[in-house]
């Protein structure tokens, strides 16, 4: 199915609504073809290779002041007519919708980034080759993870005469290497499968796993930290879902205060879907593009779909999505901009601050440090500037305790190391933490950013989090391995 045929199907759905409900009915249709493929491995061998290809049709109608949505996967005439009929029936049973924002008017939609066709149509052997390289590079350590590819082509049409179409492709790899009692992780998301080097990722995961062996336990407390991109991705995801969500902002459930310097001047956050190969329009047909949410520490915007944008008086920012009416619109392609080229990864004049409340006495140092704990030069430079603190690879199982201040609790995983005089000296057992993410990134709290971002995959293709490593003045660890 080509993009032109998807546009044709969307137009047929809109015309069916007009014929069955009359010329005053408002309708919008989104047709998307998706090709997803996943190669999964565990115990250092591939145990699952799956692929699916399908077409989805989403329809939203507004009839006699009432709104309803429906979806289906049958694109023959009978299937499309059944979708329209049941959605119209649902609309007649719905309460009146006084906040209906209307349809997207005809407007330009950016062309988006041309997708890599080779990625979209990669075969299992190509993914398996990267898995094999990952496993071989781990040199005998047990490995597990996945390599996935996706391809989407789609179109939008509504009864106001607006239409849009686009295509996208993505590849991602996420794997761990494991010793008897420690893990190391490596993740990467890219527009092209060719940009995923399984050997590089496998070697990195294995080096981190070996460096995390024989950890010591440290007491809870506030430690200065360097967070690697995998951990920073968790910050971005929670900031996106709970902070820059226009519906939560309108309900006063978000920390965001537009125009306020809520973050350190080193922090600039941009939702930038077209930084990668992504469909250039949202579920409502609004064109997508970069939106600055935080500029040099100052909160500038939250994201909106048409409904929340109309209520805020600002209009949509291109963030219409399934479930937005309930949970709210969310930025799914958030970038923490790295340090400008030529700037130091750490800058004592810009990021000066006091050391965190050190809860430990100095442990005997390991000569030469822990080889393999630091994954890249950016992280190494941030670590080198830290007198005493922790290097953290990854967060997981994070849950919101207070959405307004965005206090999060969660666990570290895949490697934590004590840093002394700029050198990782000991692997450390995992911590539980409880921290307000905006406060941890607040004025004076950011002591350094890496110069190069690493795009981290989300659970769903099309979403990703792009960040450099990050050095923070303090992070609140509230429990150790013993409780």
Image (tube, grey):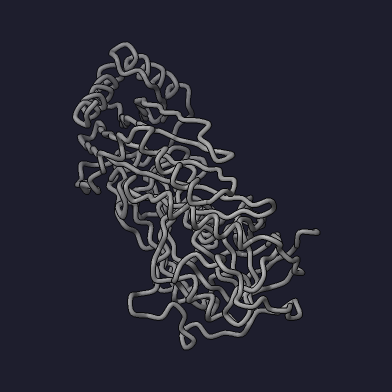
Q: Considering only vertical position in the picture, is 457 above or below 222?
A: above
State which quarter of the image contains the N terminus.
Answer: top left
**Drawn side of residue 285 relative to residue 389, left or right:** left
Q: Is residue 74 left or right of residue 448?
A: left
Query: On the rendered image, what quadrant is the C terminus found in?
Result: bottom right
Quarter residue 424 falls in = bottom right
**Residue 54 sits in which quadrant?**
top left
Residue occupying the far top of the picture: 78
Q: Residue at 58% of width from left, 77% of height from top?
A: 423
| Res. 63 visible in picture | no
Q: Is residue 271 left or right of residue 360?
A: left
Q: Position of residue 99 (x, y in %)?
A: 42, 41
- 317 or 368, which is in the foreground? 368
408 on left or right of 450: right
> At x 33% / y 75%, what residue is drawn?
341
Q: Position of residue 340 (x, y in %)?
A: 35, 75
- Residue 371: image quadrant is bottom right
Q: Position of residue 364 (x, y in %)?
A: 73, 79
- Residue under the image location 64 percent in, 52 percent down: 179
Q: How many marks?
A: 0
Q: Which residue reaches farthest bottom? A: 349
The reply to whether residue 383 is in sight is yes
Where is residue 315 shown, x and y percent of the image? Answer: 34, 51
- Asked whether 258 or 151 is in front, the reply is 151
The residue lying toward the viewer, choosing from 106 and 199, is 199
């Amino acid at each position: 199915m080509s993009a032109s045929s998807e546009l044709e199907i969307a137009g047929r759905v809109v015309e069916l609504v007009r014929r069955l409900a009359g010329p005053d009915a408002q309708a919008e249709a989104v047709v998307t073809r998706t090709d997803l493929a996943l190669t999964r491995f565990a115990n250092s061998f591939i145990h699952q290779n799956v692929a699916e290809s399908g077409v989805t049709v989403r329809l939203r109608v507004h009839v006699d002041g009432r709104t309803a949505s429906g979806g289906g996967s049958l694109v023959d005439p009978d299937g499309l007519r059944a979708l329209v009929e049941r959605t119209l029936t649902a609309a007649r049973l719905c309460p009146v919708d006084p906040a209906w924002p209307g349809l997207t008017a005809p407007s330009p939609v950016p062309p988006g980034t041309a997708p890599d066709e080779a990625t979209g149509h990669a075969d299992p052997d190509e993914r398996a080759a990267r898995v094999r390289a990952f496993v071989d590079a781990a040199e005998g350590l047990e490995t597990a993870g996945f390599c996935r590819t996706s391809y989407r082509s789609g179109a939008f049409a509504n009864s106001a005469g607006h239409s849009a179409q686009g295509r996208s492709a993505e590849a991602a790899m996420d794997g761990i290497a494991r010793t008897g009692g420690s893990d190391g992780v490596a993740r990467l998301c890219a527009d092209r499968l060719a940009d995923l080097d399984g050997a590089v990722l496998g070697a990195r995961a294995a080096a981190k796993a070996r460096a995390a062996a024989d950890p010591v336990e440290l007491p809870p407390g506030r430690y200065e930290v360097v967070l690697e991109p995998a951990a920073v991705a968790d910050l971005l995801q929670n900031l996106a879902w709970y902070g820059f969500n226009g519906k939560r902002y309108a309900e006063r459930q978000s920390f965001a205060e537009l125009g306020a310097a809520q973050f350190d001047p080193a922090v600039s956050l941009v939702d930038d879907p077209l930084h990668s190969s992504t469909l250039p329009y949202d579920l409502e047909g609004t064109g997508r593009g970069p939106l600055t949410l935080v500029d040099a520490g100052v909160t500038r915007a939250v994201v909106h779909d048409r409904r929340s944008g109309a209520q805020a008086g600002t209009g949509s920012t291109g963030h219409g999505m399934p479930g937005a009416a309930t949970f709210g619109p969310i930025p799914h392609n958030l970038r923490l901009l790295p340090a400008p080229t030529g700037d130091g990864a750490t800058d004592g004049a810009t990021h000066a601050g006091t050391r965190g409340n050190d809860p430990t006495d100095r442990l005997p140092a390991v000569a030469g440090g822990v080889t393999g704990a630091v994954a890249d030069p950016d992280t190494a430079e941030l670590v080198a500037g830290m007198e005493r603190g922790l290097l953290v690879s990854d967060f997981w199982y994070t849950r919101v305790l207070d959405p307004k201040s965005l206090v999060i609790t969660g666990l570290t995983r895949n490697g934590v190391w004590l840093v002394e005089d700029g050198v990782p000296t000991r692997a450390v057992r995992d911590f539980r933490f409880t921290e307000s993410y905006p406060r941890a990134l607040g004025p004076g709290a950011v002591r350094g950013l890496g110069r190069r971002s690493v795009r981290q995959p989300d659970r769903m293709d099309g979403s990703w989090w792009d960040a450099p490593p990050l050095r923070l003045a303090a992070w609140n660890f509230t429990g150790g391995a013993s409780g």
